[in-house]
Image (tube, rainbow, N blue to C red):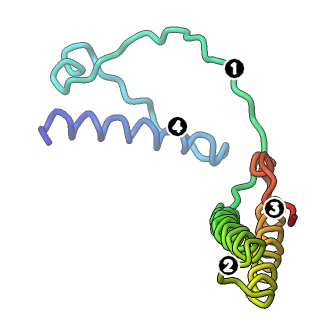
Amino acid sequence: MTSRRIVARLVLQAGVVMALGRGMSEAAEAPPPLQLDASQREHIGLQVVTLQAIQLAPAAHGFGRLLDPTPLAAAVYDREAARAALDAADREYRRVQTLQRGNSNASQRDLETARAAFEREQANARSAADRALSGEDETYGERPATQQVN
């Protein structure tokens, strides 16, 4: 830092201290103001400019609350995983159902097992959808998370 900047900073700090000192105690005598002529100001690099009025944009003030999005994101990911598991269980149930109707390699027990797996995944998908919808954002409810069993 150059000596001019150091002196300019000290001059400004002295002015701030003097201004604060005046407001602290009315009984205390204020020190005389610091006066610099044009050559002194030029020597230390201090510029005196006239302040210009500016127009500030209007601002709105309010109160907000920041929420952690992690639980909502986890619920959405759980919903997507449950939807994928439901789709897989649905395909398996339909496959076994088709095989059993055609008297091919599917027993009634296989069909019941596939149906139970489908209904379990359907319940999981409903539960995951409810958890996702319990958050603040309503945009997650655009598609149904469950399908009907035939």
Mark toward the viewer: 3 or 4: 3
Q: Position of residue 80 (x, y in %)?
A: 65, 63
Question: SS class of the residue under badge 1?
Answer: loop
Q: Amino acid at mark 4?
A: Ala
Residue 55: image x %, image y %? 60, 11
Say whether marks 2 and 3 touch (CB < 8 Å). no
Counting other residues with Cα less than 10 Å from the Cα at mark 1, is it few (<14), some (14-19), or many (20 or more)? few
Query: Closer to the observer: label 1 or label 4?
Result: 1
| Label 1 vs 4, first from the N-terminus | 4
Up/down of 78 relative to 112, above or below? above
Residue that appears at 42% across and 35% down: 15
In the image, residue 77 sits, relative to residue 106, either above or below, namely above
Pick the residue in front: 43 or 103. 103
Residue 71 in sight here: no
Q: Nearer the viewer, mark 2 or mark 3?
A: 2
| Spatial separation of the CA atoms under disc 1 and disc 4 | 31 Å
The answer for how far apart the CA atoms under marks 2 and 4 are is 97 Å
Give residue 149's quadrant in the image.
bottom right
Instruction: From the image, tell me which residue sits under label 4.
Output: 19
Q: Nearer the viewer, residue 28 or 92?
A: 92
Residue denoted by label 3: 146
Q: For marks 2 and 3, give the CA distance.
A: 29 Å
> Circle 2 is placed at which residue position?
104
In terms of image quadrants, where is residue 78? bottom right
Q: Position of residue 95 (x, y in %)?
A: 67, 70
Element under label 4?
A: helix
User: Which numbered tag is attached to residue 35?
Assistant: none
* The C terminus sits in image quarter: bottom right
The amino acid on which the numbered mark 1 sits, given as a three-letter code, is Pro
Disc number for residue 58 = 1
Of the residues under marks 3 and 1, which one precedes in the sequence?
1
